[in-house]
Image: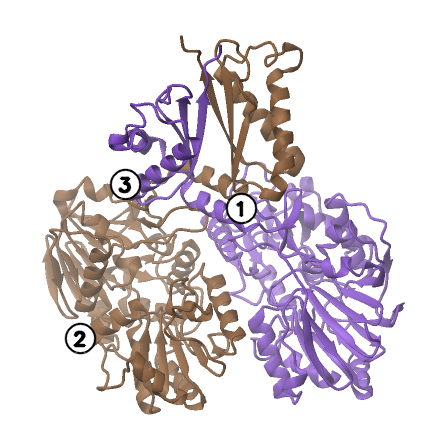
Chain colours: A purple, B brown
Amino acid sequence: MSPHKLRVIPLGGLGEIGKNMMALECGNDIVVIDAGLMFPSEEMLGVDLLIPDISYLLARQKNLRGIVITHGHEDHIGALPYILSQLTPPVYATKFTRELILVELKQRGVRTNAKLNIVSPGSRIKLGNFTIEFFSVCHSIPDSVGLVIHTPLGIVVHSGDFKIDYTPVISEATNFSQLASLGEKGVLLLLSDSTYAELPGYTPSERLVSDTLDRIVSEAKGRVIVTTFASLISRVQQVFDVAVKNGRRVFIIGRSMKEIVSMALKTGYLTAPPNIMCRLDELKTLPHNRVIVLSTGSQGEPTSALVRMANRDPSSRVQIVSGDTVVISATPIPGNETLVSKTTDSLFRQGANVIYDKLAQVHVHGHGSQEELKLLLSLVKPKFFVPVHGEYRHLSLHASLARSMGIPKDNVFVLENGDVLELGRDSGKVVAKTRVGVIYVSGLITGELDGAVLRDRKLLSRDGVVVVTVVVDAESGKLAERPRIITRGFIDAGEEQTLIEKGRDVLIAALEDGRRGFVSRGRLNKPSFVDAKVKDSLSRFFYEQIHRRPIIIPVVVEVKRKS
Amino acid sequence: MSPHKLRVIPLGGLGEIGKNMMALECGNDIVVIDAGLMFPSEEMLGVDLLIPDISYLLARQKNLRGIVITHGHEDHIGALPYILSQLTPPVYATKFTRELILVELKQRGVRTNAKLNIVSPGSRIKLGNFTIEFFSVCHSIPDSVGLVIHTPLGIVVHSGDFKIDYTPVISEATNFSQLASLGEKGVLLLLSDSTYAELPGYTPSERLVSDTLDRIVSEAKGRVIVTTFASLISRVQQVFDVAVKNGRRVFIIGRSMKEIVSMALKTGYLTAPPNIMCRLDELKTLPHNRVIVLSTGSQGEPTSALVRMANRDPSSRVQIVSGDTVVISATPIPGNETLVSKTTDSLFRQGANVIYDKLAQVHVHGHGSQEELKLLLSLVKPKFFVPVHGEYRHLSLHASLARSMGIPKDNVFVLENGDVLELGRDSGKVVAKTRVGVIYVSGLITGELDGAVLRDRKLLSRDGVVVVTVVVDAESGKLAERPRIITRGFIDAGEEQTLIEKGRDVLIAALEDGRRGFVSRGRLNKPSFVDAKVKDSLSRFFYEQIHRRPIIIPVVVEVKRKS
């Protein structure tokens, strides 16, 4: 490929929320930004998670110089275990991010020869034709970075996932001067986070949540139970700070919360005075107004600590008591709304006072709203713009923002995964479309999604399965016994008997086929005939009787006389 | 039951969104308010809809004096076809509501002897001990009413579903003076709509949407396609008004929209100048800036007109062209968010400019926010308060509002479906809990939800089914053939062969059972033994190989030699 062109190939993350992965190619060098997973939508029955299709990279392995990770959220690192078992480029990530990558690899049981290098804001690395500098951005997880990528064609800026927070709780404020001076020098391309391109205004500062938490904790007469994302370390820091301020101790419950807090304390991303955390035995003796419980479960996850409390799971080490205040310091990720609502209702039922985002400012987003997106565009002043990290409408709206700020519409590209955008110094266009299949992980299987299997699962989920066994005497051609019918997920035991009996009669009559007398005259020797009759007659029967369409599986056994 | 007590028995609608049904009982008289359906949650696989359990009413049929309907939404009328096929009390509804009930009965193919009486705001009906007056309320469907129910014990006010809109588009503003004077006289009990008890402030007036629609239509250079709920007649009226104002004609697409608009025009709930609507042939010749298309599909319903346009369905009479403005004049009902997002993305992909609630004020809710709920409490000044129409957290928050306004906490009752609340003149308490099963409708079956069937459907939806046929020679006790394995919804054809072959080997080895030699020595005569071996060995095998757990159905056929 020409070194006078730069190719931008999104392999995931565009037109969807999740599995972020962007390839940049120039001459014989490819670098990849992020390698995330995506959770399946409802219809993808039986699928655990989705990862990007890396066929493009596998075909060009020897050109792959490295993978650069912007931050440790699963939609940016979750595909690494699968990818690093097929490719072994060097990986570059900040310290906190690398810790999470190690956890991810361990959880998936993957060992890799790829080297996981640590970088920090200010680091500069050379990957073939590309020189990459890292700069700090504010996001909902520590050690998030954006990238300044020097290419032969010009400078590319990648925002990472970001918001602009002038009063951040733990990270440093975004380095505007660096971005501004780049903009003055001239930036070829900006790739920017479109997640909240729909929302006008600014995303509030993390600091606002401190005020609200402080108010809630100081007013609470009993215990306060706070749930948030375990990786939202700035929020965890605020919980510790508020505990100190209000003379309360913090009990942590939930495996992922305990692990991440422990890691963050060890690596210095979280600071807590000695003794602020308490053990279970201490929790049991402390007065309720001297306690904050920090818990997993902000997304209503069924196995999380909060949900077990909400469900009165007897094995939970903490039970809800009337008078508890529960703070859900998060918003439901799209798709999780029902889980969170159910958990909230269960907590209210137990007499807890539940405070969540609709009722008070107990959470702020980690992504920028329109004004921040415009601010970045205005500082960086790119020649070309590609919105990233969003569903199509987010990308489209972000593109409109860019055009409204003067970037010519021919220089603004709303891409889809697999598009190969080729930029020259003066113009760009999509020159090809590389294949990007839907790669799913289900149990230990990784592969492309099979439409037939999904369709069957959908049918099975609605109306179940009916297994019909027809035993035919091979010589006489007659039925050796009355057909058997077994059902699962179809109708319930009480209803079953009468309908099933009728079904067997209907089947025998269909096999008999009237005057042809296939049953009585003994002509059932063709298994394919029997198979078809079973499916036709019973499909029609079940639909007419009860308007249901189970999957019908005929099992035809021919028995031969032995000599 | 004593005539000196009033019983309040919610049969649906509390702790859930949908299947509203409230019974009031005094002496030998029962009246029922509303009879709605509920759509199933995701986990209720294969279920079409849910209806209230009317066992309580069936056991007291001769006391049931009538069913009163507050408005025509499905969560208030959708269970009538099922109920009126079992009971035939007189039904009372306003004109528009009654039209929708007739449509509902027709669609479900139900004929009933129950009389559907028409009432209007100001009507007074006597049902045994109860005298019921109807008053107009503002909601998102025409002809909505609240109820003033005179009982021997005192006055009960039921808000219906309501908001307070001082500048309504089609209905009349709520009659405050009547409510205020009732409050002065003394109201025993208020039952009030809790849907938006979480939201502070006021719900904006419907009129605001007129302004936004007008702005959008006047600025649009091309066609404007508006989608909203077909029953939201005030919005349809606004679309007509805005069309007239901007010199555009309206083309209606989508069966339910056409039917309801036609009914509303005929019954006078909608007014449109002659010629404002156009036919398809006219649509094809009108300039794009002289057209508004009014369409179904505001909830992303797969068969709706808008979704067919979004999916480029060739059979759709209208196709999206770049430059179209699409206004989604609704918000997604909880559960429908993904459908609506996908539709929005598809429309953007086709070059439409989509405007929805996040971007502009194109929709307002039909339920009151906190200030309106407090206003009603303050006008009515009830002795007792029961929040209705909401999930538990909504009811709980509404109860807190009432307590904050001075109603003693012993007089505020957060009930669940099936609670029997008994009120005397001075106090009340829940005296019993009547059974309320989950009654589902699935195809033509109505019954109680069977846990086993649902669990099986869940397993089938994730990992499918594996049917294993083992044919045993009854005399020799040996396998008559190699076991057969058929799978559906399990793994795909490509993967299948190797794993399935291995599975058959594993099964034969398990049946052989090592030294016991059940296969080689011919001892497979016990079907229950074979059955168990099939399930154990293959469950373990599939889990070890690929971490999947399909439902395994063994079919054991013993073949006998014929003499």
Is there CB contact under 8 Å for labels 3 and 2?
no
Image-based side of A173 in relation to A28, left or right? left
Q: What amino acid is found at the position of numbered circle 1 in the picture? A: Val
Of helix, strand and loop, which one carries label 3?
helix
Of helix, strand and loop, which one carries label 1?
helix
| Residue name at image x 62 percent, y 37 percent | B497
Q: Chain of mark 2?
A: B
| Residue name at image x 80 percent, y 56 percent | A98
Q: Is A515 situated above or below B21?
A: above
Image-based side of B248 in relation to B332, left or right? left
Measure the C-alpha gap from mark 1 to mark 2.
49 Å
Which residue, given by chain and number where applicable, does mark 1 sit on? A453
In the drawing, what numbered circle is on residue B266?
2
Q: Quick one: label 3, few (<14), some, or many (20+) residues within 10 Å?
A: few
Q: Chain of mark 1?
A: A
Q: What amino acid is found at the position of numbered circle 3 in the picture? A: Gln
Q: Of B418 and A470, which appears nearest the observer?
A: A470
Image-based side of A193 in relation to A472, left or right? right
Residue B452 is situated, as x and y percent measured from the top left of the image, at 43, 35
In the drawing, what numbered circle is on residue A545?
3
